[in-house]
């Protein structure tokens, strides 16, 4: 016999039963308690001297009070994991998890029973709380699911009633929805690949915007869809993730007619520019000799003709020079559409110095011009010269010599540079600011001033050609500040130019 066997054989049963953490009691065949261990005292509050000898029903057990599981013939023994409630000595109802088995003598005859139990009241409370929370959560999920289903139904109904085509594709490039206008043109292709159905491609399109859309960006492009030869403006937008799958919505507007109109307008404008260039060049060739002849007659025959005739000759010369200036401006306006970005950055400060020198040579009777150091521009020299020669001539023409200096500066922003020319002259009224850039428009203060009404139109056309803006503001204290905002990187817009 080993030492461990000797220890177990010599260990008092009472001592062993008293050390287990579970409550335990023994009953005889009449269900009277014959043994009550310390854990049973702790759990129920009843000491052994009060419990031993009593019928076990004194614990007011449920369902034990209705039918005893131990001596119930319909309950196979042992009973493992049974549940019941009892009332403790303090009157508290607690929940028990218990095991029961018969006790037999050496002949196998049942002489009583043994029951062990643990207090699971806290566990029971937590389980009930979790069940309630689960039920509440399930109700909320069902409610939210119903709301989402209604929302999705409304969403798809809206898409179906649109005149524009719309479809939804998932991250696997599979069409999951096509609205009514799209079904009418393409048929029901839900479940097929978008690149096959829409673009007749055998694999994902090289320009596919899916990655950008899934980075929560809205992407716009123009594409020919299907085999009908129609052009569509397509707006791709991200949709909420559904079942862990990302999806995008694409709305397709037919712009075939618009694109044709744009092409027609672009061609018409090209023809108009060519006509303006040709007629301006030809008329200038006719008028230039008139100026020369008038100047020759005035210089050589001033003694032959009387003063009135000489005044007429002088007026003919002035009007011819004005017409030549107008034709030169029209030539510049026509040529703006054909200018390409410069091969190298343009030194804006050098061009402003050049324009200032020209103005001083022509007429030194104008306010002083001060210029801050300006950033270089990607526009070619010709466009930069057109901008500042028109803006500075305009400022010198209307600002009196006694006014403060004409200022040239800029605002440097993230993606654009805004150049400005600020004068302190009479300014421009609010109603006129919208019209001041129209070709041939001259404001109320232009009476008696030289000018053709084309210079500011050139400035605006350059701005629109480069996807920029041109506008005028009031100078604090009086005067006008002309601004032109240009992108920092080369951008020429044929569409903007042709529709301006």
Image (cartoon, grey):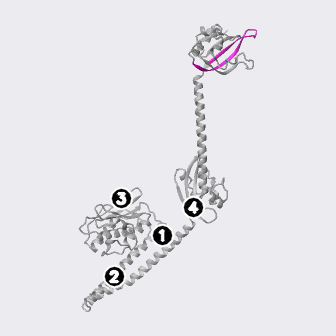
Residue 461's place in the image compared with 74, above or below, is: below
Which of pointers 2 and 4 indicates the residue nearer the eye? 4
On screen, residue 260 versus residue 372, left or right, reads: right
Q: Counting residues from the N terminus, which is met first, the one under dot 3 or under dot 2?
A: 2
* Badge 2 density bin: few <14, some 14–19, many ≥20, Cα 10 Å: some
Q: Residue at x 61, y 47 (%)?
A: 149
- Quarter containing the N terminus: top right
Q: Residue beneath label 2, please?
A: 319
Neighbor class of circle 3 (other Cα within 10 Å; few <14, some 14-19, many 20+) is few
Question: Are the residues at dot 4 and dot 1 in contact (C-beta closer than 8 Å)?
Answer: no
Give whichever of discs 2 and 4 has the lower sequence position: 4
Task: Determine which residue is flagged by label 4.
Answer: 253
Q: x, y percentage for residue 383?
A: 39, 68
Mark number displayed over residue 445: none
Q: Nearer the viewer, residue 2 or 492?
A: 492
- Per the model, the C-alpha gap separating discs 3 and 2 is 40 Å
Q: Earlier in the sequence, mark 4 or mark 1?
A: 4
Q: Earlier in the sequence, mark 1 or mark 3?
A: 3
Q: Which residue is mark 1?
A: 498
- The residues tagged by marks 4 and 1 sit, at their Cα atoms, a distance apart of 22 Å
Q: Which mark is first along the chain, 3 or 4?
A: 4
**Could you say which quadrant of the image residue 147 lies in?**
top right
Question: Mark 3: which secondary structure?
Answer: strand
Quarter of the image for the C terminus: give it.
Answer: bottom left
State the residue position of label 3.
411
Q: x and y percent of residue 6 in the render?
A: 65, 8
Distance in Å between CA atoms under marks 1 and 2: 32 Å
Vertical arrangement, residue 55 with respect to residue 411, above or below: above
Q: Residues at badges 3 and 2 in contact (C-beta under 8 Å)?
A: no
Q: Residues within 10 Å of mark 4 (few under 14, many from 20)?
A: some
The range drawn in magenta is 92-117
Local packing at callout 1 (Cα closer than 10 Å; few below 14, some 14-19, many 20+) is many
């Amino acid at each position: 016999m080993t030492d461990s066997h000797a220890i177990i054989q010599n260990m008092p049963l009472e001592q062993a039963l008293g050390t287990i953490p579970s409550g335990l009691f023994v009953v005889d065949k009449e269900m009277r308690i014959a043994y009550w261990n310390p854990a049973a005292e702790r759990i129920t509050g009843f000491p052994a001297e009060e419990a031993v000898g009593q019928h076990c029903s004194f614990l007011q057990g449920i369902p034990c009070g209705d039918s005893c599981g131990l001596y119930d013939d319909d309950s196979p023994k042992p009973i493992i994991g049974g549940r019941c409630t009892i009332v403790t000595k303090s009157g508290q109802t607690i929940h028990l998890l218990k095991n029961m088995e018969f006790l037999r003598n050496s002949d196998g005859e049942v002489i009583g029973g043994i029951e062990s139990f643990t207090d699971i009241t806290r566990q029971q409370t937590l389980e009930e709380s979790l069940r309630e929370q689960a039920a509440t959560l399930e109700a909320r999920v069902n409610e939210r699911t119903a709301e989402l289903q209604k929302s999705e139904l409304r969403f798809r109904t809206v898409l179906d009633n649109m005149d524009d085509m719309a479809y939804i594709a998932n991250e696997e490039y599979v069409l999951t929805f096509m609205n009514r206008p799209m079904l009418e043109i393409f048929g029901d292709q839900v479940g097929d690949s978008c690149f096959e159905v829409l673009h007749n491609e055998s694999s994902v399109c090289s320009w596919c915007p899916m990655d950008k859309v899934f980075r929560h960006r809205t992407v716009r492009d123009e594409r020919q869809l299907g085999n009908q030869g129609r052009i569509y403006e397509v707006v791709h937008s991200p949709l909420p993730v559904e079942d862990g799958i990302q999806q995008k919505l694409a709305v397709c507007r037919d712009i075939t007619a618009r694109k044709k109109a744009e092409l027609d307008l672009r061609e018409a404008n090209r023809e108009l520019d060519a006509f303006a260039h040709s007629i301006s060049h030809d008329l200038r060739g006719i008028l230039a000799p008139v100026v020369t002849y008038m100047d020759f007659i005035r210089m050589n025959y001033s003694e032959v003709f009387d003063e009135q005739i000489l005044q007429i000759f002088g007026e003919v010369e002035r009007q011819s020079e004005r017409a030549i200036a107008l034709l030169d401006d029209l030539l510049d306006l026509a040529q703006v559409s054909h200018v390409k970005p410069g091969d190298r950055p343009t030194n804006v400060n050098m061009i402003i110095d050049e324009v200032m020198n020209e103005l001083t040579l022509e007429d030194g009777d104008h306010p002083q011009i001060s210029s801050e150091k300006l950033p270089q521009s990607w526009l070619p020299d010709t466009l930069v010269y057109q901008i500042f020669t028109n803006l500075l001539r305009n400022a010198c023409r209307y600002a009196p010599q006694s006014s403060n200096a004409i200022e040239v500066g800029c605002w440097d922003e993230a993606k654009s540079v805004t150049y400005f020319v600020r004068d302190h002259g009479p300014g421009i009224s609010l109603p006129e600011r919208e019209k001041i850039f129209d070709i041939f428009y001259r404001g109320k203060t232009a009476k008696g001033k030289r000018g053709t009404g084309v210079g500011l139109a050139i400035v605006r056309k350059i701005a629109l050609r480069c996807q920029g803006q041109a506008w005028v503001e009031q100078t604090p204290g009086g005067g006008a500040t002309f601004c032109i905002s240009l992108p920092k990187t080369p951008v020429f817009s044929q569409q903007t130019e042709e529709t301006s």
